[in-house]
């Protein structure tokens, strides 16, 4: 009986907590958050994201930077062309030893945990610090693209007429260019102006990455702007900006959030492709695409040098998968046709 009473009290506590959170964030947001933490697909995605966040936050602990002024510079063990297998000893310019290495391994000899790529770039450092690069690139490009797309899509749908026609024709022009070749061309043009590094490729991806957000939000707002509560707000003289931010956008933004979560992973893959082609991150910068580019000369010998592709490739695949799982779960949670099936 005591156990039953305690279980009842626990359920009552969680119910009260749920009602409080619902009051703070609103019904729709609470339903979305509740679905994320109870949906098996989203839980798998969130666990993967948690692992990547842990690696990114504790990168200086997991792999102490060899270059204090530039921690993203991958340390290299000489200049030999032949990759070294996992477990090889450092021969020259050994980076600082992490505090956890000696208690676990019982030695002060730092080894190449994941081996080295061609040019003796340490793969472990590239994978660990490349996690920070992936998060920064994916989040910044998505935020910029979503901000541009949401702004133009909202203006286009709400005002309609000539404004809608002009904005959508501009969107059509940008969508007419194949995404990867267009970003590659613009990045190559911007590199001499902005210098070699992350920013030319990030700017190029942002310039061509907003169209999907604009199209999606426009289609949602076109239906929402004709609903009774929006028409009533117009009748009583509420300003357009207030109608947009208080009534229209909050009810139309959720599908855009789903698209944004999925785009983060795809942007990271596209950026890695640019790095692989030599117009993304500079040589030696901690980026998964950069690591894969070091393996180009050894693609025909992957039976022996499998590690130069497997480690950065698996990191890239799992990172993209984690965001796609969260996006799929959000879509299922927010799709009215699927409500009641969770």
Image: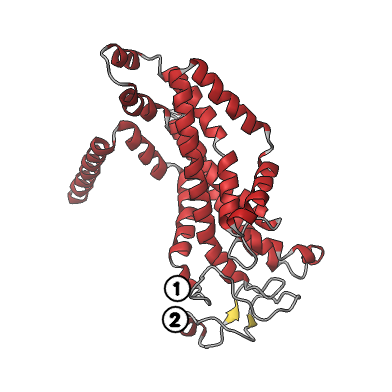
Camera-nearest residue between 96 and 199: 199
- Where residue 255 appears, as percent x and y from the top left, is 47, 32
For the C terminus, give its image quadrant.
top left
**Any part of residue 258 in sight:** no
Label 1 element class: helix
Circles 2 and 1, Cβ within 8 Å, touching? The answer is yes
Q: Residue 99 carries which label?
A: 2
Camera-nearest residue between 44 and 21: 21
Q: Residue at x 46, y 71 (%)?
A: 60
Q: Which residue is drawn at 41% across and 42% down?
A: 36
Look at mark 1 in the image and give the residue it sits on: 61
Give the answer, above or below, for where 14 lies relative to 308.
Answer: above
Give the answer, above or below, for where 77 lies relative to 197.
Answer: below
- Where residue 177 appears, as percent x and y from the top left, is 68, 35
| Position of residue 69 in the picture relative to residue 77 (left or right) | left
**Any part of residue 146 in sight:** yes
Counting residues from the start of the chain, the first of labels 2 and 1 encountered is 1
- Where residue 229 appears, as percent x and y from the top left, is 32, 16
């Amino acid at each position: 009986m005591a156990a039953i009473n305690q279980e009842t009290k626990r359920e009552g506590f969680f119910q009260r907590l749920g009602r409080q959170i619902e009051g703070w964030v609103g019904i729709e947001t609470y339903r979305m958050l509740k679905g994320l933490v109870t949906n098996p697909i989203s839980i798998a995605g969130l666990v993967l994201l948690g692992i990547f966040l842990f690696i990114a936050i504790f990168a200086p602990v997991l792999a102490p930077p060899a270059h204090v002024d530039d921690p993203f510079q991958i340390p290299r063990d000489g200049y030999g062309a032949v990759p070294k297998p996992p477990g090889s000893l450092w021969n020259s310019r050994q980076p600082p030893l992490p505090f956890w290495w000696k208690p676990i391994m019982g030695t002060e000899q730092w080894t190449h945990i994941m081996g080295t790529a061609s040019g003796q770039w340490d793969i472990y450092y590239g994978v660990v610090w490349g996690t920070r690069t992936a998060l920064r690139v994916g989040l910044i490009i998505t935020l910029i693209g979503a901000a541009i797309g949401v702004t133009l899509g909202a203006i286009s749908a709400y005002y309609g007429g000539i404004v809608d026609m002009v904005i959508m024709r501009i969107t059509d022009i940008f969508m007419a260019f194949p995404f990867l070749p267009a970003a590659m061309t613009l990045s190559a043009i911007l590199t001499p102006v902005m210098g070699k590094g992350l920013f030319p490729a990030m700017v190029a991806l942002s310039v061509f990455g907003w169209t999907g957000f604009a199209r999606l939000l426009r289609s949602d707002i076109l239906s929402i702007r004709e609903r009774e509560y929006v028409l009533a707000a117009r009748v009583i003289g509420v300003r357009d900006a207030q109608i947009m931010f208080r009534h229209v956008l909050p009810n139309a933004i959720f599908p855009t959030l789903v698209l944004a979560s999925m785009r983060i992973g795809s942007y990271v893959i596209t950026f890695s492709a640019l790095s692989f082609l030599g117009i993304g991150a500079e040589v030696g910068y901690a980026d998964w695409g950069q690591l894969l580019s070091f393996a180009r000369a050894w693609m025909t010998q992957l039976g022996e040098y499998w590690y130069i592709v497997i480690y950065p490739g698996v990191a890239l695949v799992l990172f993209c998968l984690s965001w796609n799982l969260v996006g799929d779960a959000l879509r299922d949670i927010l799709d009215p046709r699927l409500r009641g099936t969770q």
